[in-house]
Amino acid sequence: MTALALGFADQVTQAQQVFGAVMNALAHPGRLQTLRIDIAPPRPLTPELAAVALALADHEAPIWIDARLAAEQAVAEFLRFHTGAAIVARPEEAAFALITDLEEPLPLDRFALGNAEYPDRSTTLVFAVSDLSEAGGWTLAGPGIPARRNLMASPWPHDLAEIVHANRSLFPRGLDVLLAAPGRVAGLPRTTRFVEEV
Amino acid sequence: MMTRASTDAAPEAGYNFAYLDEQTKRMIRRAILKAIAIPGYQVPFASREMPMPYGWGTGGVQVTASILGGDDILKVIDQGSDDTTNAVSIRKFFERTAGIRTTTHTREATVIQTRHRIPEETLQEGQVIVYQVPIPEPLRFLEPRETETRKLHALAEYGLMHVKLYEDIARHGHIATTYAYPVEVAGRYIMDPSPTPKFDNPKMHRMAALQLFGAGREKRIYAVPPYTEVRSLDFEDHPFHIQTFKDPCAICAATGVYLDEVIMDDRGGRMFVCSDSDFCEERRACGHRGSMLAEAPAALTGGNTHA
């Protein structure tokens, strides 16, 4: 048995910093926020995905992990130990979904969307990408964006366009998205829409 | 008025940073994230007992405690003023439990907790304004059942609110609601802006700062992201108007700001002064002088009364 990877060295400060970055990411969709992280979770879990989970998940907020993460037993052990959250097999029970395999289609119709009276009871999807940029890619509009903003993620998650389009018709229900690259995070709350370029 | 350094009052031992335990903060933080994602929608949260009574801003305090970091600079106002009991005690609470810096200057603050006003100075991107909310449900006095108001919000069935405003017109000839004036956020949810004067409603529209609302007793958190449409409800033939004041501030001569009436004596003497004490002070520091500056009580003009 190998030793468990460490969590935040200073839990109070780092949880606040990660939360602050995520809050600003969702308040300013498409703008990159800095994540300063010093943890080294078991691969293929990325430090950024782990940090979001450690900062925000607990016994009241279960985590779903994709098949690639689930294949590595140490990932679930690490998350369970440091967050106290249940690692759930059913996507609809998850408060947070951690996704590293961007090619594999997600069970999109199974994540929690919330209901009309409680649209907040929905899953937040957290994708690990290799790079994020505020140039090129998709043009975004919606609350939190003064006029237009651009966001490029590489690789681009297979299901992202479908999620964003579905969010428009589902609102106020919907899925909120975080994209986390090394040292950075961007948010696409359910209010954000893609502007089709002419 | 000044910025207080964190060093002159070491945080109290025995408390977690900013008083709340980490599990509570996570729960509140998750509620805040969903509130931002669904502008104007009231997210239920497990409000904790705070070491102050309901009505003293327990909701705002919990939101502030959950977002504060060690580098934040906090300003707290009550009815626009930095020196009233509620503002002073909440500021001290965070000085003692978080050891953070506090300020009275709107421009310097990264987090502004407010009871019933929005500062006159335009808020900037990167700032967060936290409103203390007594009754978050704008439909509550029209429909007392939570199950029903939930349904009305779910269906965006807001006819009741329009009827209420219309009845105002029928009775008074104009919309007589002057504070907690309902707004529509991002074209969807009707939201209570907290008991701010309707004078402040236009400031919420496309504000660059993030707006968070906390109701402790009612256990609700809601939000308006930056640059979001906030429309005060009205009718084509009765458009929304804000209050106007006949005279400028009596001590700093500011116009286009919200004024408080100050009773001077028991013979009907009174004056109208800025409700935003920091704004008024800065103007006087710049040499602006109102018509009654000389006769104004020291508590209004020089009064650096807060410790």
Image: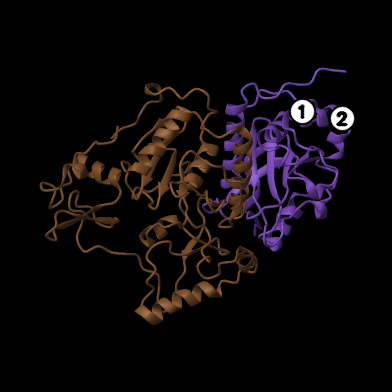
Chain colours: A purple, B brown
Q: Is residue A176 visible?
A: yes
Q: Residue at x 42, y 58 (%)?
A: B195
Q: Is residue A81 left or right of residue B5?
A: right
Residue closest to the eye, B20 or B227: B20
Q: Which mark is residue A72?
A: 2
Q: At which x and y percent is residue A81? A: 77, 28
Q: Which mark is residue A81?
A: 1
User: SS class of the residue under badge 1?
Assistant: helix
- Residue A183, located in which quarter of the rendered image? top right
Q: Is residue B13 above or below residue B293?
A: above
Please state which amino acid type lies under the numbered disc 1.
Answer: Phe
Of callouts 1 and 2, the N-terminal one: 2
Q: Residue at x 24, y 36 (%)?
A: B304
Q: At which x and y percent is residue B79? A: 34, 50
Q: At which x and y percent is residue A9? A: 64, 21
Depth check, mark 1 against mark 2: the one in front is 1
User: SS class of the residue under badge 2?
Assistant: loop
How packed mark 1 is, by other alpha carbons closer than 10 Å (few <14, some 14-19, many 20 or more), is: some
How packed mark 2 is, by other alpha carbons closer than 10 Å (few <14, some 14-19, many 20 or more), is: some
- Residue B245, located in which quarter of the rendered image? bottom left
Q: Is residue A43 above or below residue B270?
A: above
Please state which amino acid type lies under the numbered disc 2.
Answer: Glu
Q: Is residue B203 above or below residue B108?
A: below
